[in-house]
């Protein structure tokens, strides 16, 4: 079942569309958006959310046109984790995660359970009462992810969740996203780290020059001719440069 559909979409942050003729359907699983800087990955996520308005085409969420959904309904369908989301106030971790329930119409008990489940999934319960400003970068990233997970939306859109994190924290974040995808969520994640994308994603969508150039398994996309030409480099199916691990 398609949870999110883009039909003949064109658009971007300015008057001239940077994305054109985008046709994509997203169901359950973890989909990685890959491509060079400026390919339109963040713009695509923002179009899906309604933060940018397409100049052409239709976006459907749960079978309904995005334009027909209220802001609250959009938030109930889709959760969003922006890239390097700033937190400049000393809010306690548990209170920040609770913000993920702002669109909920459930009972207070159900809201509390959703918050606790999200905190457990992200392994942040031990510092629930600490101000987020006292946490490390990796811990803070997990708190912000927990806020998105607490929404329990069927669609989770994530923009570069592993940037500026050490390898251990990167793996931790990707494992959380993979687990949520296996539980039935449609996770769409913009990524620059190709080995991470190859290891954790079920599907990759390759954006280049404002269009979808490839759409398939990680191995199919990473070894496609168009991918090699766009980067000027040849990658193996694991996302490494072909000569990096020749002896593995």
Image: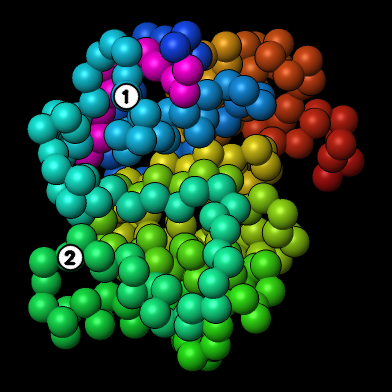
- Magenta extent: 3-14
- Can residue 211 be spotted in the picture? no
Residue placed at 10% from the left, 32% from the top?
A: 68
On screen, 157 above or below 104? Answer: above
| Residue 244 horizontal/vertical position (percent) | 87, 36
Q: Where does the image place residue 26, in percent across and percent down from the top left?
A: 31, 34
Q: Residue at x 41, y 82 (%)?
A: 94
Density class for disc 1 (Cα within 10 Å; few <14, some 14-19, many ≥20) is some
Mark 1 to mark 2: distance in Å? 25 Å
Q: Secondary structure at mark 1?
A: loop
* Percent coordinates x, y for residue 93 in the rendering: 48, 80
Circle count: 2
Describe residue 24's horizontal placement relative to residue 105 as left or right.
right
Above/below status of 98 relative to 70: below
Among the 4 quarters of the image, the one containing residue 109: bottom left
- Residue receiving disc 1: 53
Give the main secondary structure of the magenta stretch.
strand
Q: Which of labels 1 and 2 is toward the front?
A: 1
Residue topped by disc 2:
104
The answer to whether any part of residue 91 appears in the image is: yes
């Amino acid at each position: 079942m398609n949870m999110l559909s883009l039909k003949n979409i064109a658009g971007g942050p300015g008057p001239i569309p940077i994305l054109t003729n985008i046709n994509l359907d997203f169901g359950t699983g973890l989909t990685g958006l890959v491509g060079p800087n400026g390919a339109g990955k963040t713009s695509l996520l923002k179009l899906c959310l309604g933060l940018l308005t397409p100049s052409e085409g239709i976006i459907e969420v749960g079978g309904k046109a995005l334009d027909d959904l209220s802001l609250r309904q959009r938030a109930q369908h889709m959760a969003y984790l922006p890239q390097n989301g700033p937190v400049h106030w000393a809010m306690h971790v548990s209170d920040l995660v609770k913000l993920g329930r702002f669109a909920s119409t459930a009972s207070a008990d159900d809201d509390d359970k959703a918050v606790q489940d999200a905190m457990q999934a992200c392994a942040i319960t031990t510092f629930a009462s600490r101000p987020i400003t006292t946490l490390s970068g990796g811990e803070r990233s997990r708190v912000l992810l927990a806020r998105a997970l607490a929404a329990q939306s069927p669609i989770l859109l994530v923009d570069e969740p592993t940037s500026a994190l050490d390898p251990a924290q990167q793996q931790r974040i990707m494992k959380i996203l993979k687990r949520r995808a296996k539980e039935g969520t449609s996770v769409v994640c913009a990524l620059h780290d190709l080995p991470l994308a190859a290891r954790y994603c079920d599907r990759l969508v390759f954006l280049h020059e404002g269009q979808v150039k490839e759409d398939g398994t990680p191995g199919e996309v990473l070894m496609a001719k168009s991918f090699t030409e766009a980067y000027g480099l040849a990658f193996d199916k694991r996302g490494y440069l072909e000569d990096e691990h020749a002896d593995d």
